[in-house]
Every structure is written in structure tokens, then in C-alpha cells.
């Protein structure tokens, strides 16, 4: 009986720590700005204005290989691996594009920075780039992401938008919102650029 109480106590502490991490992380982390254009039962249409990213290109073609190498390089840049030794706040989501001919991973830079304000990366594999404004269709899912789940959601989203006569304007991107240590309440999205007129 004593063991039961000990295990229950440890479990309760673990739950409290995880809850605190989820809440504090959500309060502190700046999310990339967008405007909700239309909400359907299973997906959304959003408008993303231009934004500045730190980006790496990778020869990897799957989630794990791109995530492992890309995250280290980008984290190195924002945690002082630049010509000013400056720390830049972590934002969300992390964006990943997985392609057979090569992939990429990017962190959106905090909104307060202009492209010219950002320090130069020490790692030549990290590039500062600016995105174009775009309309996208978005589908969300929970849990930990992997290639199978990402492709399943991509195919589902493609079917939904095409059945509604929406034209696809580019390849899909995976968006991840949570740190690896966050075990529940995870948010993942797949976005597909579309042609849209308001």
C-alpha cells in the first residue's frame, strides 16, 4: 500500500511539473502572426504576412533527419552563435519542409526584429530569409509527429481543399509548436499554400 502512495505521489508531481511547463511555455513563447480568414469543420484558411526566418537547408528527406540536424544549427544561432553573441528569443512554430530533393527547417524571428537588425550567423549553413505573404489551408493534429502522421494529414488536407475547389499553390509545410519534453497538449499543423481571393 505504501508503494502505491509513493508511485501516486511521484505521478502527481510529474503531472504538476508538466502542466507548469505547458502553461509557462505558452505564455512566454511568441507565435508567428497570421489572420484567420475562414474556419471549416476540419481545416482553416489563414493569411500569413511576410516574416523573417533563420533557415537551414538539409539533404535529409524525413522528419527525424531534418529535425535533429536542423534544430541544433538553428538553436545555436539564436542562443548566441552569431557575430554579436546575442541571444534571440525562441518562437513557435518550427517550420519544416521535407522533400525528396532536399529539405529545410526554419525558426521565425521575433516580430520586433527587422531583417537588417538581426546578427549574422556564425554557421554559414544558417541563412536569414524573408517569406512572401501567402494564403494557406491548415489542418491540426495532436501527439508527437512522425513522417506517417504528417503525410496522412497532408493527404487529408489536400483532399478537403480540392473537394472544395481550392487550388493548391505550392508544397506542404509541417509546423511544430512544442518542446520535446512536453508530453501532452501538443500541437502540430500541416499547411498548404493556396490560391485565395478575399
Image (spheres, helix red, strand yellow):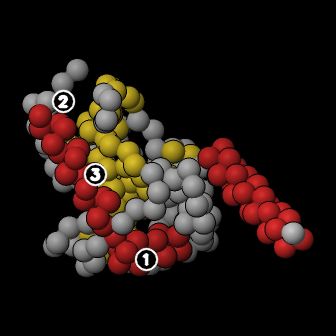
Residue lying at the far front of the rendered structure: 1
Label placed on residue 196: 2
Q: Residue 15 at what x, y percent from top left?
A: 72, 57
Which callout, 3 or 1, points at the residue further toward the start of the chain? 1
In the rendered view, tell whether residue 49 sits above or below residue 119. Answer: above
Q: Nearer the viewer, residue 24 or 57?
A: 24
Question: How many angstroms separate mark 2 from mark 3 (CA)?
Answer: 21 Å
24 left or right, relative to 169: right
Question: How many angstroms separate mark 3 from mark 1 (CA)?
Answer: 22 Å
**Disc 1: CA contacts within 10 A as few (<14), some (14-19) or many (>=20):** few
Q: Residue 4 at what x, y percent from top left?
A: 82, 68
In the rendered view, tell whether residue 101 sits above or below residue 192. Answer: below
Q: Nearer the viewer, residue 105 or 78?
A: 105
Which callout, 2 or 3, points at the residue further toward the start of the chain? 3
54 left or right, relative to 130: right
Which callout, 2 or 1, points at the residue further toward the start of the chain? 1
Residue under pointer 1: 68
**Disc 2: CA contacts within 10 A as few (<14), some (14-19) or many (>=20):** some
Looking at the rendering, which quadrant does residue 55 occupy? bottom left
Label placed on residue 28: none
Q: Nearer the viewer, residue 16 or 187?
A: 16
Residue at x 30%, y 66% (from the top left corner): 147
Rendered-image quadrant of the C terminus: top left
Residue under pointer 3: 153
Residue at x 40%, y 62% (from the top left corner): 145
Residue at x 36%, y 66% (from the top left corner): 146
In the rendered view, tell whether residue 119 sits above or below residue 159. Answer: below
Amino acid at each position: 500500500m505504501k508503494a502505491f502512495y509513493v508511485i501516486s505521489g511521484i505521478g502527481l508531481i510529474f503531472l504538476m511539473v508538466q502542466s507548469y511547463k505547458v502553461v509557462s511555455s505558452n505564455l512566454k513563447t511568441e507565435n508567428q502572426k497570421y489572420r484567420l480568414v475562414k474556419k471549416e469543420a476540419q481545416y482553416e484558411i489563414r493569411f500569413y504576412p511576410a516574416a523573417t526566418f533563420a533557415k537551414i537547408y538539409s539533404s535529409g528527406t524525413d522528419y527525424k533527419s531534418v529535425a535533429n540536424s536542423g534544430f541544433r544549427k538553428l538553436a545555436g544561432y539564436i542562443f548566441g552563435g552569431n557575430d554579436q553573441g546575442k541571444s534571440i528569443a525562441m518562437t513557435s512554430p518550427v517550420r519544416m519542409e521535407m522533400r525528396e530533393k532536399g529539405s529545410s527547417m526554419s525558426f521565425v524571428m521575433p516580430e520586433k526584429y527587422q531583417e537588417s537588425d538581426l546578427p549574422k550567423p556564425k554557421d554559414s549553413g544558417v541563412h536569414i530569409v524573408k517569406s512572401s505573404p501567402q494564403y494557406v489551408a491548415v489542418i491540426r493534429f495532436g501527439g508527437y509527429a512522425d513522417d506517417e502522421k504528417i503525410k496522412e494529414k497532408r493527404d487529408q488536407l489536400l483532399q478537403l481543399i480540392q473537394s472544395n475547389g481550392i487550388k493548391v499553390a505550392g508544397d506542404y509545410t509541417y509546423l511544430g509548436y512544442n518542446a520535446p519534453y512536453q508530453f501532452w497538449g501538443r500541437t502540430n499543423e500541416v499547411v498548404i499554400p493556396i490560391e485565395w481571393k478575399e
